[in-house]
Image (cartoon, helix red, strand yellow):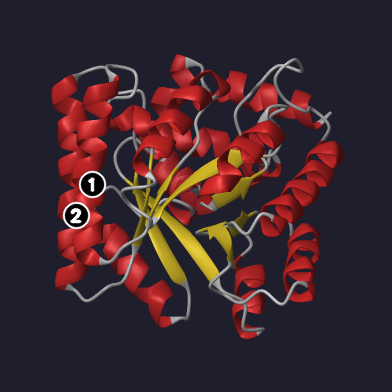
Amino acid sequence: MAALARAVVLKVFQRPGVRRWMERHGMALGAGRFVAGETAGDALRVAAGLLAAGRRVSLTHLGEYTSDAAAARAAADTYVDLLAAARSRALEVGLSIKLTQLGLDLDLDVCLENTRRVLDAAAGAGALVEIDMEDSARVDATLAVFQRLAPEYPFLGVCLQAYLHRTPDDIQRLAPLRPRIRLVKGAYAEPPSVALQDRAAVTRRYLELARRLMDAGCFLAAASHDGALLREVLGEARRRGLGPDRYEVQMLRGINPSLQEGLVAAGEPVRVLVVYGREWYPWFVRRLAERPANVGMLLRNLVSPAARRRGP
């Protein structure tokens, strides 16, 4: 049922008419809860508040599947400028980047050049960088870039998706690097031949892989909004005597803020991913598909008096 609900949400919200309407009104109807805004200034203001509240913060400028070399270079420039702006405000932030935004679909050398420029800027700013994972067709290319750059940039991490059948083998292949791994359940619509479809099975796989990463001496960034699952993962970390230099919890801004607050109050290291940019819609739709109950939030806002006054 969860896979069916996810597929329905993706199909509906990817329709051209729905997309045009949502791109016009979606921020006011609830997307603004998750997306900091469209500018770097918006993102840095949000980051400053989260840092003051005891969170770690990573920023991502939304955009993917760049098909133009100039646009890929511009995306790298955006991250270099973002780090400079954060440094000027004395904000210690990390980055989460998508390689297709930096030219992965164009040419490997183009992607490597742009990614290195971002990483060189991050090294100067003392900022960690994590490579986000995209759809299954791009996993091999993404991991190839990571494996090539990780020895040069020890602060570089990569995301793995628990629901993909291949992920246990990917962990085994990466383990000798003892890398920083952000482990997520997975939000792309993938077929049964590629990914687990049952929500409970994905949760079991996630916990199994988290244990495997800890056993291998990797840094585990446990990225989830599932409180019960996070309690299991944190319990495993405590049983192994791991400190905050070996693990952290990662959550998206706007999702389950009470859980974030509780974890911070308990002394757990929590990193919040703050996203921003004009290309927010595809990312937001995947968040809706990941948790279809969020569609109800949009509908409630749509029929509220304030929403009706805004009109279509």
> In 3D space, how far apart are the residues under numbered discs 1 and 2 (Cα atoms)?
5 Å
Q: Which residue is mark 2?
A: 121
Q: Residue furthest front?
A: 176
Q: Could you tell me the amino acid type at mark 2?
A: Ala
Q: Nearer the viewer, residue 145 or 202?
A: 145
Q: Position of residue 60 (x, y in %)?
A: 36, 49
Check the image and report above or below for 49 versus 26.
below
Q: Are marks 1 and 2 in contact (CB under 8 Å)?
A: yes
Residue type, label 1:
Val
Q: Is residue 90 visible?
A: yes
Q: Is residue 269 above or below residue 83?
A: below
Residue located 69% across and 59% down the image: 214
Left or right: 190 in relation to 22: right
The quadrant in which the C terminus is found is top left
Q: Looking at the picture, does residue 61 appear above or below residue 245?
A: above
Q: Which residue is mark 1?
A: 118
Q: Position of residue 304 (x, y in %)?
A: 57, 50
Tell whether 212 sits left or right of 128: right
Q: Is residue 140 left or right of residue 64?
A: right
